[in-house]
Amino acid sequence: VTDDVTISVVYANVTYPNTTISQLTLSIVAGTSKYNNSFTAPALVGNYNITFFANDSTNNINSSVTSNFTINDVVIPSVTVHSPQARSIYNASAIVEIAANVTDDVNVSRVYANVTYPNTTISQVTLTLVAGTSKYNNSFTTPGLLGTYNLTYFANDSSNNINSSVTSNLTVQDRVNPSVTVHNPIARSAYNVSIIIEIAANVTDDVNVTRVYANITYPNTTVSQLALTLASDNKYNA
């Protein structure tokens, strides 16, 4: 900026994409005719218009010079796994927190995880923001299908920059014994010789019951094994 007399003030009006105007005072760089200042690009994406104002000591103003710039969001969201950590092991029917810490320089619009089952089926789990944090989470109940489940986290910002590079996995195992309750005979029952006795138990499991049998130990210590078959509901008998 130059003038035939004296320059008194130089500033720039920066008009945001939402029409807000910010005034930025420009200061002379020693030994030059350049007036400048720094402007930190905000998180509001779009076109910014600049109008320069130069005022001399007799109040002559030049406001005819303009410029503009555009702020783009080209940075993908940052994603770190919170849970489950890779190679975590859970029992079938366990409730697992699927969670990731997600941040973005502008705005996070959507976070979800694709869970790939051992049989290659894919289930999408939407993760929601935990208030006051950068953690996005949801619950996932492990099914009765045993094996390794692979997780891929997806974070999408408002400019459609997607981070899908973060993964984890978990393994579902069956480490719980079946539940067995006696149906018949009740302990200390007494029967006459040659009578037909129902041997029965109620059996359940968090995954699958494959075989039920009873060992009958005779008074002379002989052991007889009796296979029980499913009769109804959870009852196995012979």
Image (cartoon, helix red, strand yellow):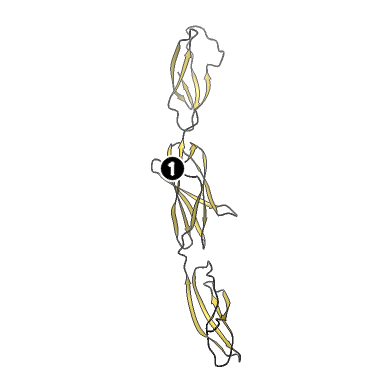
Residue indicated by mark 1: 149
Q: Which residue in the rendered view is the most extreme toward the left?
A: 120
Q: Which residue in the rendered view is the most extreme toward the bottom?
A: 4
| Residue 17: % across, % down | 52, 72
Instruction: Identify the residue shown where x is 43% and y is 24%.
Output: 211
For residue 26, above or below residue 156 = below
* Residue in front for this viewpoint, 213 or 33: 33
- Left or right position of 167 against 101: left
* Residue in front for this viewpoint, 68 or 233: 68
Label 1 crowding class (10 Å Cα cut-off): few <14, some 14-19, many 20+? many
Number of numbered discs present? Answer: 1
* Residue in front for this viewpoint, 40 or 194: 40
| Residue 32: % across, % down | 52, 84
| Residue 230: % across, % down | 44, 24
Kindly indicate the quadrant of the structure image that contains residue 9: bottom right
| Secondary structure state at the residue bearing disc 1 | strand
For residue 154, above or below residue 194 = below
Instruction: Identify the residue shown where x is 50% and y is 84%.
Output: 65
Quarter of the picture containing the C terminus is top left
Amino acid, disc 1:
Tyr
| Residue 233: % across, % down | 48, 27
For residue 213, above or below residue 82 = above
For residue 59, above or below residue 227 = below
* Residue in front for this viewpoint, 228 or 155: 155
